[in-house]
């Protein structure tokens, strides 16, 4: 595990949402870190801990596109006790989400897993003007959505990460995913208003 500061990472790579991956708490003079299922593959070599002070957290939160954030609650000693993050400007109409989930058979189109919580992923990145319409959305599990991050769709489909993740997909789904790239130029672009 490597310990870093906020200056060690490119804040612009943080993206526009925060995904809660686990919990950190202290007690009896010890600190405990617990990851949510499927959020950590146990590879401590690639785990990086970023230590941030109050100003760093404010900068980090501002990098996201959160409309409404109650950022901090302090304890009696002035230490950080709680962070609450509320909905983002990228709130997707649930009717559109469910149509995408149904169209994709309630299955992650990247890894093929079923029976897990799904998200919708913008094919043309939201940050690049990708519209929130069915044609620009694909069902993805949280892990795959997070792994893709802000990688352009074509680069993602050709990446080693995608090849590794998609190794259990049937050939038809893999070909459909590859064919999507040819349709992206025809999608309309919008100006997505950011909250910062």
Image (cartoon, rainbow, N blue to C red):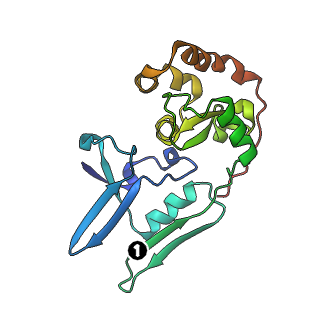
Query: In terms of secondary structure, where does tag 1 sit?
Result: strand
Residue 90 visible to the viewer: yes
What residue is shown at x 58% (from left), y 49% (from top)? 16
What residue is shown at x 69% (from left), y 42% (from top)? 97
Figure quadrant of the C terminus: bottom right
Identify the image quadrant of residue 87.
bottom right
Q: Where does the image place residue 18, in percent across and percent down from the top left?
A: 52, 53
Q: Where does the image place residue 174, in percent across and percent down from the top left?
A: 54, 17
CA neighbours of label 1 inside 10 A, class few (<14), some (14 to 19), many (20+):
some
What residue is shown at x 52% (from left), y 26% (from top)? 156
Q: Is residue 30 depicted above or below 118 in this figure?
A: below
Say which residue label 1 marks: 80
Q: Is residue 174 depicted above or below 12 in this figure?
A: above
Number of on-image labels: 1
**Which residue reaches farthest left?**
29
**Which residue reaches farthest front?**
115
What residue is shown at x 56% (from left), y 41% (from top)? 118
Q: Where does the image place residue 157, in percent across and percent down from the top left?
A: 53, 22
Residue 192 visible to the viewer: no
Identify the image quadrant of residue 100.
top right
Q: Where does the image place residue 145, in percent across and percent down from the top left?
A: 52, 38
Identify the image quadrant of residue 69.
bottom right
């Amino acid at each position: 595990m490597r310990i870093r500061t906020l200056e060690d990472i490119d804040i612009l790579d943080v993206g526009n949402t925060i995904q809660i991956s686990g919990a950190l708490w202290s007690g009896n003079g010890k600190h405990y870190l617990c990851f949510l299922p499927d959020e950590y593959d146990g590879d401590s070599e690639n785990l990086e801990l970023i230590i941030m002070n109050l100003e760093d957290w404010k900068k980090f939160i501002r990098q996201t596109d959160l409309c409404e954030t109650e950022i901090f609650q302090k304890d009696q000693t002035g230490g950080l006790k709680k962070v609450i993050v509320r909905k983002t400007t990228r709130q997707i109409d649930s009717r559109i989400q469910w149509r995408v989930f149904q169209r994709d058979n309630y299955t992650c189109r990247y890894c093929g897993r079923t029976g897990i919580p799904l998200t919708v992923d913008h094919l043309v990145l939201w940050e690049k003007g990708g519209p929130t319409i069915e044609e620009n959305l694909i069902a993805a599990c949280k892990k795959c959505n997070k792994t893709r991050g802000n990688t352009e769709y074509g680069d993602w489909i050709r990446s080693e990460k995608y090849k590794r993740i998609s190794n259990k997909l049937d050939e038809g789904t893999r070909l459909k995913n590859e064919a999507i790239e040819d349709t992206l130029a025809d999608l309309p672009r919008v100006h997505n208003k950011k909250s910062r």
